[in-house]
Image (cartoon, rainbow, N blue to C red):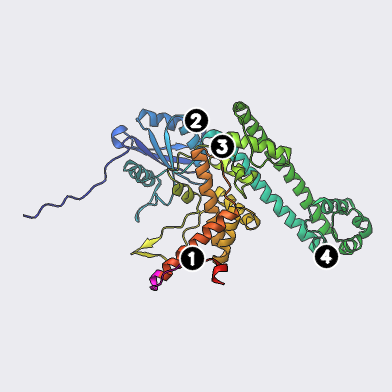
Amino acid sequence: MASKRVGKRLSVLYPDCAGVDVGKKKHFVAVDPSRSETAVRSFDTFTDDLEDLAGWLKACGVKVVAMESTGVYWIALYEVLDRAGFDVRLVNPRATKQVSGRKSDVLDCQWIWQLMSYGLLDGAFRPCDEICELRSYVRQRARLTRDAARSVQHIQKALTEMNVQLDSVLSDIMGHTGQAILRAIVAGERDGERLASLRHSRVRADTATIARSLRGNWRAEHLFALEQALARYDFLQAQIGACEQQIATFMERVSEAQASETVTLAKPSRNQAERTLQLALTRLMGVDLTAIPTIGVETALAVASEIGPDFSRFPTCGHFCSWLNLAPATRISGGHVLPGRAPKRTNPLGQALRLAAVSARHNNSFIGAAHRSRLARLDKGRAIKATAHQLARLIYAMVTRGEAYVEKGIETFEYERRVKQLTALRRNAKRLGFELSEKPLETAA
């Protein structure tokens, strides 16, 4: 007699959950119909309405709340619910994509609640409030730095339109000599010889060459554009300085809380401000991340601001590298890797590690030798990603284990590469029916 097949069904893992469809003007919330007479309610986005939403969820006995990451509209609701003691899960909109058919805000929040009740949604990573404060300062400074770079491009455009070829004789037009000349031009100076006399002694180009490059067609509209671009650059530099002061104040507060801990830096910076930041970052993270070759103070600050010292959200190093978008994408169907590129994802910390990997090409260390070896057999993009992946593994091991970085050196890399080459030679010789024996070169001669 044939046995009756019993299909495996989904079981409810979170009976006390709610789903929220986030909007700009209204939030739609769905709970289990057995917990309230009105299973779906809408709330305005004012602060008192958000507090009413949290109170209603508490009255319904809700403990877990799932919401979509819609723009920046979720931030205020997330913070209110988090302060109220809820376990808030910020989920990717791709995971909550509605099935084909009718679509409305009511159906969307019910769909999110249903998926969350069966445990089919995973929350995105968000650090604690203290680290979120530092992350906000660091990201704001990064935005201002990008805007300042655009202002430099506008300055360059105005100079080009006037045929002032200052960039042909100076490697950095915003350096000491470049800024002195630009500010003199905005102040009304047009004589090339006088402008060239502002040249710093370390500039390679001579005064005559700089004077020739400063002969332009001083049109009023181009000078006006140059003046505004330079004023915008100065304004952004002042704002960047204010952000750096906020970061320094935050790190001082962290250092005061952990002042009793003795910290030893592997590579202390010569700059006093950077050295102070190094000490504060080491106290915060528990290890000196700047001891890793190619990892500078800026990259260590990115690690501290994006994650903080708590890596418990990432069970393994593979989870950490996947979150950084440094692990190979898994796109397999029918036993074959799907063609095309994976969906584009950006991660600020992953980008910072890629920039750190670029500088490994000229680094005299084990990581530098490994990166040069990858560049010899891979294209540049893949080699940079592989080196960034190596840096991520080192950071994960140091923070989770609390161990200091130990430099292996180029000699160790060369020895390991020689062992790998000999192993490959023995394997190929055995496959061809031969046996490989080592003999010193002098004996063979």
Above or below for 266 versus 370 = above
Element type at mark 4:
loop
Q: Position of residue 259 (x, y in %)?
A: 62, 27
Looking at the image, residue 64 sits to the left or right of residue 182; the answer is left
Tell me the CA gap for discs 4 and 3.
51 Å
Pointer 4 and pointer 2: residues touching (CB < 8 Å)?
no
Q: Position of residue 81 (x, y in %)?
A: 46, 33
Q: Earlier in the sequence, mark 3 or mark 2?
A: 2
Q: Nearer the viewer, residue 331 or 44?
A: 331
- Of the residues tagged 3 and 2, which is closer to the observer? 3
Q: Position of residue 318 (x, y in %)?
A: 44, 49
Residue 431 among magenta residues: yes
Tell me the CA gap for discs 3 and 1.
48 Å
Looking at the image, residue 172 sits to the left or right of residue 139; the answer is right
**Predominant SS of the magenta segment:** loop
Give the residue number, with chain letter if any, for mark 3: 285
Residue 114 appearing in the image: yes
- Of the residues tagged 4 and 2, which is closer to the observer? 4
